[in-house]
């Protein structure tokens, strides 16, 4: 068994097998929730409920683009 934290977004889908992941040592999940001012990840809330059942820690990732095009990632909302 490993102790790991995984990073997810809507690109990973909704059929992710969280129960199996929890049994294999996933301690926490960081899930993208927003990008920019108006783009909300459409499956964040759906996945959050499934994640809560198996992970000890849930982090919320916010993404934004800088003026020079670089990506800024902020992980907040750590929920233990």
Image (tube, rainbow, N blue to C red):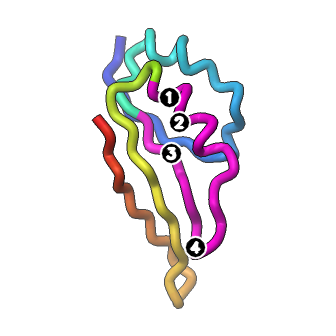
The N terminus lies in which quarter of the figure?
Answer: top left
Spatial distance from mark 2 to mark 1, Cα to Cα? 5 Å
User: Residue at label 4?
Assistant: 36
SS for tag 2? helix
User: Residue at label 2?
Assistant: 48
User: Residue at label 3?
Assistant: 31
Q: Earlier in the sequence, mark 4 or mark 1?
A: 4
Q: Quadrant of residue 14?
A: top right
Q: Earlier in the sequence, mark 4 or mark 2?
A: 4
SS for tag 1? helix
Q: Nearer the viewer, residue 1 or 76?
A: 76
Is mark 2 in CB contact (under 8 Å) with mark 1? yes
Q: Magenta segment range?
A: 29-52
Spatial distance from mark 4 to mark 1, Cα to Cα? 24 Å
Left or right: residue 42 compared with residue 68:
right
Is mark 4 in CB contact (under 8 Å) with mark 3? no
User: Residue at label 1?
Assistant: 51
Indicate yes or no whether the magenta region holds residue 16.
no
Above or below, 27 relative to 8 = above
Which is in the foreground here, disc 3 or disc 2?
2
SS for tag 3? strand
Spatial distance from mark 4 to mark 3, Cα to Cα? 15 Å
Is mark 3 in CB contact (under 8 Å) with mark 1? yes
Spatial distance from mark 4 to mark 2, Cα to Cα? 20 Å
């Amino acid at each position: 068994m490993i102790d790991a934290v995984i990073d997810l977004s809507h690109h990973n889908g909704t059929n992710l097998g969280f129960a199996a992941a929890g049994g294999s040592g996933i301690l926490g999940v960081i899930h993208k929730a927003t990008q920019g001012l108006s783009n909300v990840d459409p499956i964040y809330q759906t996945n959050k409920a499934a994640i809560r059942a198996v992970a000890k820690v849930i982090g919320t990732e916010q993404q934004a683009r800088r003026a020079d095009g670089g990506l800024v990632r902020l992980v907040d909302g750590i929920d233990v």
